[in-house]
Each structure stands twice: as structure tokens, then as C-alpha cells.
Image (cartoon, rainbow, N blue to C red):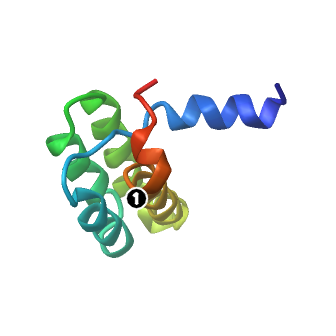
């Protein structure tokens, strides 16, 4: 296993699975209002709430540096992909 794949696997285990069509709303919120979508994901997900709250706050407070905004958009895309298609069937890690 390469170092990149182990890092990616470690990151992906913190992306919550969401019910319904929340992944679309959260992606849009994360693009327009950095971190807010991640905080909403923390409210609607059944697991990993603590991590989503921490990540959402960090994204929000670092958005003025553009780091938080980029992180928020990438995180929104990861949540969207995690909850659509074949990735939707993958179990929580």
C-alpha cells in the first residue's frame, strides 16, 4: 500500500454518509459559504458528528485565507461522491 493511498483512506474515513439528497445541498453550501455545508452535514449525519463540526469550523475560520474555501469545496465534492453512485454502497469505515 502506498503512502498516498493510506493518507487518502485516513481522510476518507471522516467523510459522513448522508441520507436523502443532502449531499447536493451540502456541496452547494460548501461552495457558496465555506464550512457551513460541513456543519449542516454534522447536523444531518448519524455518525462522525464531532469531526464534521471541527472540520466545518476550521473551514469557516480559515476561509479568508482561501485555504478554508478550497478545503470546503474539496470536502463538499468528497461528500457528494461518497453519497452517490457506487461509493454510496461502501460501508462506513
Q: Residue furthest left?
A: 43
Q: Quadrant of residue 61?
A: bottom left
x and y, in percent, of residue 51 in the image:
35, 31
Q: Residue at x 40, y 56 (%)?
A: 84
Relative vertical location of residue 6 with respect to residue 37 in this rendering, above or below: above
Q: Residues within 10 Å of mark 1 (few under 14, many from 20)?
A: many
Q: Nearer the viewer, residue 66 or 50?
A: 50
Q: Which residue is mark 1?
A: 80
Q: Is residue 90 toward the left or the right of residue 28 in the image?
A: right
Q: Quadrant of the N terminus?
A: top right
Foreground pick, 27 / 67: 27
Q: Is residue 79 left or right of residue 23?
A: right
Question: Residue drawn 41% across and 52% down?
Answer: 79
- Left-right relation of 22 to 52: left
View extreme (bottom): residue: 32
Which residue is rendered at x = 51% and y = 64% of the image?
Answer: 65
**Number of marks:** 1
Q: Is residue 32 above or below residue 34?
A: below
x and y percentages locating residue 68 in the rendered image: 47, 58
Q: Residue sitting at 62 percent across and 32 percent down?
A: 9
Front-lying residue, 17 or 38: 17
SS category of the residue bearing label 1:
helix
Amino acid at each position: 500500500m502506498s503512502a498516498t493511498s493510506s493518507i487518502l483512506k485516513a481522510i476518507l474515513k471522516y467523510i459522513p454518509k448522508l441520507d436523502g439528497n443532502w449531499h447536493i445541498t451540502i456541496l452547494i453550501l460548501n461552495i457558496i459559504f465555506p464550512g457551513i455545508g460541513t456543519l449542516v452535514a454534522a447536523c444531518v449525519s448519524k455518525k462522525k458528528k464531532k469531526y464534521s463540526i471541527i472540520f466545518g469550523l476550521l473551514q469557516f475560520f480559515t476561509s479568508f485565507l482561501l485555504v478554508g474555501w478550497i478545503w470546503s469545496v474539496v470536502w463538499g465534492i468528497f461528500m457528494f461522491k461518497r453519497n452517490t453512485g457506487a461509493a454510496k454502497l461502501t460501508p462506513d469505515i
